[in-house]
Image (spheres, rainbow, N blue to C red):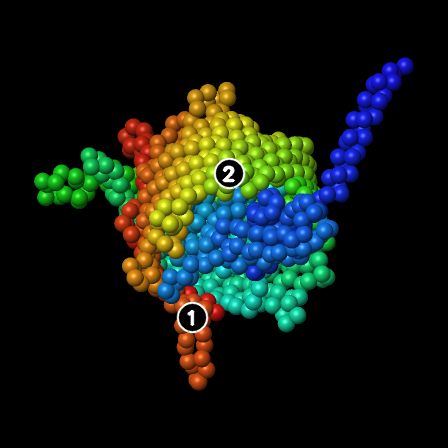
Amino acid sequence: MIPLRKITFLTLIALSFSVESYTQEGVYIQIRGTVRESSGKPLENVAVTCETPKTGTYSDSTGVFVLKLPRDAASRIINFTLTGYEPLRITIVCDKDYSTGEIVLNEKAVTLNEIMVTAVTEKTGAVMVSVPIKEFIFMPTPTYSVEAMIRTLPGVASNNEMTSSYSVRGGNYDENLVYVNGIEIYRPFLIRSGQQEGLSFINPDLVESVLFSPGGFSACYGDKMSSVLDIRYRKPSENRGSVSAGLLYNSAHLEGLSRNRKISFIGGVRYKSSRLMLNSLDSKGDYEPVFIDMQGVLSIKTGTASELSLLGSNASNIYNFLPGSRESRFGTEAEAYRLFVLFEGRERNRYESRNAALTWNYNPGSASHKFIVSWFGASEREKFDIRGYYSLNVLDKNTGSENFTDTLMNIGTGSFLSHARNTLGANVFSAGYSGTLNVPNLVLKWGLKSRRENIRDNIREWKMVDSAGFSVPYNKGEELIMSSFISARNNVVRWITEAFSEAELRYGNTVRKYIATAGLRGTYNNFTGEILASPRLSFKIDFRDKYSLWLASGFYYQPPFHREMRYPDGNINTLIRSQKSFHTVAGMSHSFRAGDRPFKFTAEVYNKILSDIIPYRLDNVRIIYDGVNSASGFSRGIELRLNGEFVEGAESWFSLSVMDSKLRIPGSLERMFPSPSEQTVILNIYFQDYLPGNPAYRAHVNISFATGLPVTSPFNSRYDQFHRMPPYRRVDLGMTRVFRKPRFSVAGRTFIFREIVAGIEVFNLLDISNTVSYFWVKTVNNYSGTSRQYAIPDYLTGRSLNFRLAAYF
């Protein structure tokens, strides 16, 4: 029997817990509400504080906050503060649970004569950074894509100004997730070079927010090994639009609301032709690039707490090229060469893609639900027959010679014939559901998604090389051997089902705020037969909104997509598996003021452990996979960034990254070799300035430096035998004049614009010849039959000029 004293003691403990619980329920009330900005977008990380008593909380990702206060306070003053927004103070008198409804914060603006610069809020989870999209208006970039700003962030690299693709922390272009309004976006499949790529899917005129993570992202995002880019298009709050025109890029967009504000629409059209820039390439000829994109979002409020939206897009990228000739000079001071090629033939490529997505949002209160049904379709075709006759000569580099820079000796002549008839069709259908539940200091997220992918391709291409009468590769018999030959027909169908759950715990006060996130993501791939689980964790501490520390870790599995599945000969490896990566990221940030202007310093270190990696080679923007999971390795480094108003009202930033990324193929190449995307040092600078006393005149400089990529010869299958390209160096300069609210009168009618921006851009200001790939020439000695190979650099665009004019109304 239990002694009476123990029973009495346990009873008293139980009663004490009951009394404490009753007391907590009886003396506290909850103040609940939602914080939004003027456009209606929810605001996260808003500090909600009470003056008496001193207590506070923060709004979550949906803008919802719950503040617990003593019941005995008769009058309460509640403050709402967020960097970049005007503070708000309200007074509440109540003795029971109270709902404030929607709290609207207005953006803080700094007016400098005719220029209005809106402060940008950095809303971060443990490893997410918000990109200042409003600076995109002024950034000089040949691609006119949001990705151009992403490439200026730490850890992000690209050695080609003609493409919107980028690599992150040693990964390749296919390892990056891109979402627009929760819909996954796909890259073109058959693209070989940056000039063929055309327009990025993301329309900058429609973008409201940009969140980016270079690694360690949460379980609510999908399965790629490097990064995630989360784009949200704007929800119109008024009727407005814009028109821009230039020598390379033209666009227009409209957005507006119905009179009852239940129907909204935002849409845009873009046109791009990079012919002027392509004329600066070594290969001369008739370039005919035409890139057109149209997309829009229609939203209808189906109730007080629900909304239905439809996103649609259509892109047509046509690239035709009639080559004429090419002259390239390369080598060193001691050994210089000249290549001349005369071309015959034509190249005709067409890349078309379409997207459609239907989304239903239901937000009854503390919970929210989202259903998305989407379709992606692509039709791509490349067709070329190009014959080239080449001559490779040694140049006289003796400065005292009368033949200085002239040809001394011919060391190789020959011809080549390249042929391709490649087609690809893709259809991806997906359906998904995600939900969010907000309770005090806790956010729960969950989701389920299934998609069907069907990729059909017909690949047939070959190349024949003839060097001084000898076919390369050389054969002493009468058989004609092609330099390369690919012929394959594939039809791949697979189902992928994904599910995730995530909990985000927020607690703290006005001095310290803690955010802990734990999530689990599961994936089933019927093609590989894999069932994968990806746990992911992160923890962040904020000190007085000045200092932040964070740590994130997790597993990331990348199911093989069409490119990764293919062997170099074009056939599918049915035994392929998912690539795997384990991320560990630690970082800190410090917000401070210098000269009464805001600045932020951020530092991050990371380590990625890689396994089941599919080795690959880079040729311009084309990724050629081995088609087998034969490699393992690591990627690690440190990244630094300083951003702020070096000039009042104009944000600039400096980014520096140092990385070490290595791979190993066990049993074949025990020696480690650099990842094909490893650029050891990356420096990016974006700086803005304006004339003293007249800030309507501005200058914008974009500076990029990256050490060279490792390159291996296509005649050699060993990855550990490589050389590095020269460093990528580029300076782009933009000069703009901003007109605030100009007036124009036409036929007796007065038109008032919100803003007009006129500018001149000088791309590659220093006219540096950057190497993007190599044209390989193999010469054969007529007597011995021995051969020697030469790597002739394929240079990117030279200096070019562009004019831009943009009007916002």
Pick the front one: 23 or 609 = 23
Q: Amino acid at mark 2?
A: Phe
Question: Where residue 797 sits: x, y (%)?
Answer: 34, 51
Pick the front one: 757 or 543 = 543
In this picture, is 632 found above or below 289?
above
**Disc number placed over residue 531 in the picture, else none:** none
Q: Residue at x 67, y 63 (%)?
A: 300
Report the residue that reaches farthest toward the bottom: 748
Whether residue 587 is visible, yes or no, is: yes
**Disc number placed over residue 543 in the picture, else none:** 2
Q: Amino acid at mark 1?
A: Lys
Neighbours of disc 2 within 10 Å: few (<14), some (14-19), many (20+): some
Q: Quadrant of residue 448?
A: top right
Pick the front one: 248 or 138 = 138
Report the residue that reaches farthest toward the right: 1
Question: Where residue 360 sits: x, y (%)?
Answer: 69, 55
Question: Where residue 366 sits: x, y (%)?
Answer: 70, 49
Q: Secondary structure at mark 1?
A: loop
